[in-house]
Amino acid sequence: HVDHGKSTTVGRLLLDTGYIRQEEIDKFRAEAEAKGKATFEFAWVMDDLKEERERGVTIDIAHRRFDTQKYYFTIIDAPGHRDFVKNMITGTSQADAAVLVCSAADGVQEQTREHIFLSRTLGVTQLICAINKMDRQEVKYSEEKFKEVVEELTKLLKNVGFKVAEQVVFVPISAFKDDNINKPSPNTPWYKGPTLLQALDNLKVPEKPTTKPLRLPVQDVYTITGIGTVPVGRVETGTMKIGDKIIFLPSGKSGEVKSIEMHHEQVTEAGPGDNVGFNVRGIDKNDIRRGDVAGPVSHPPTVVESFTANIQVLNHPSVITAGYTPVFHCHTAQVACEFTEL
């Protein structure tokens, strides 16, 4: 949810794990104060786009990496703004686990409900609820306030089918004041659970479907001088190696993988969960687009004419009748569809 402190939480995690330096934060702080956005300095680490800094909100989906003692994480900072729900869908559908940031001061908002529902629908089975802004004047690190928000969230989570006891953990934090992020906070002596970083380390790594054929939904396609066409996306199943012959469907174009890059480093192969950019010989930028799925020429992704779906309607403002044309989001694809008969 916007302004509940997601980007600030991410900025704090990156600082506490040594992925950004204090001087970067200080530089952002000076900039933030000059623009009348004081306290936004941590958030700006993730908000790379200039417009986002001006508005103080997260627009596109930003990827940053940080390491703990146990894992290395890729953070997908999914936006909280209403008009960015489609980006949120792409972000969440790439995630193994999610951190829901909810402000203790504001409690559950309409978008919090939507994000919980989307996370569940998109297959997130492990959730950390970071109850943020515990330092705020109206909260003052109160256990009561924390319990109130936890209770409200638990009800919602159960409604959408989360097994709360097994799949969800609640952590009271202040991203801005660094409470319970890296070390237990003296301000919450009543809380005996894990810090946010410990909760992240307690997540279980999903089994990697490496034996299945390669499937990679394309998130974007770039043209890079001196390299050529570079599709970007996350490997869902299988592995991609340099020299592989791959095909993109439904566009039907094929080519050979010349190079693979992950977090700005060249790699020779990528597996499930890896966010990569890769160059394909014989493919032009206009041949493929977001929403195409890459797979081996020998075992191409299947394309269907129709499928049966179970549709759930969330707070739709008006009546849905024949002729209604919503936009469908399917992995990274977005397609307008029409209701012909109801």
Image (spheres, rainbow, N blue to C red):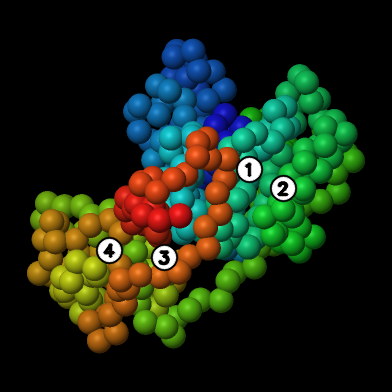
Q: Mark 2 points at which residue?
A: 156
Residue 46 screen position, x and y as percent: 45, 38
C-alpha distance separating marks 1 and 3:
29 Å
Q: In this view, does 129 lie above or below 299?
A: above
C-alpha distance separating marks 2 and 3:
31 Å
C-alpha distance separating marks 3 and 4:
17 Å
Circle 1 sits in a helix, a strand or a loop, which is it?
helix
Which quadrant is the N terminus positioned in? top right
- Whichever of labels 2 and 3 marks the residue nearer the N terminus, that label is 2
Q: What residue type is labelled 4?
A: Asp
Which quadrant is the C terminus positioned in? bottom left
Q: Which amino acid does label 3 sit on?
A: Asp
Mark 4 burial class by Cα count in 10 Å: few <14, some 14-19, many 20+: many
Residue 155 screen position, x and y as percent: 77, 48
Q: Mark 3 points at which residue?
A: 274
Q: Can residue 293 be seen in this view?
A: yes
User: Residue 173's image quarter?
Assistant: top right
Residue 135 screen position, x and y as percent: 74, 27
Q: What residue is shown at x 79% (from left), y 25% (from top)?
A: 139
Q: Are marks 1 and 4 in contact (CB under 8 Å)?
A: no
Q: Is residue 44 above or below residue 181?
A: above
Judging depth in this view, the residue of 137 and 329 nearest the camera is: 329
Numbered circle sitting on residue 113:
1
Q: What residue type is labelled 2?
A: Leu
Numbered circle sitting on residue 253:
none
Circle 2 sits in a helix, a strand or a loop, which is it?
helix
Numbered circle sitting on residue 292:
4
Judging depth in this view, the residue of 32 and 218 nearest the camera is: 218
Question: In the visual, does 180 lie left or right of 34?
Answer: right
- Whichever of labels 1 and 2 marks the residue nearer the N terminus, that label is 1
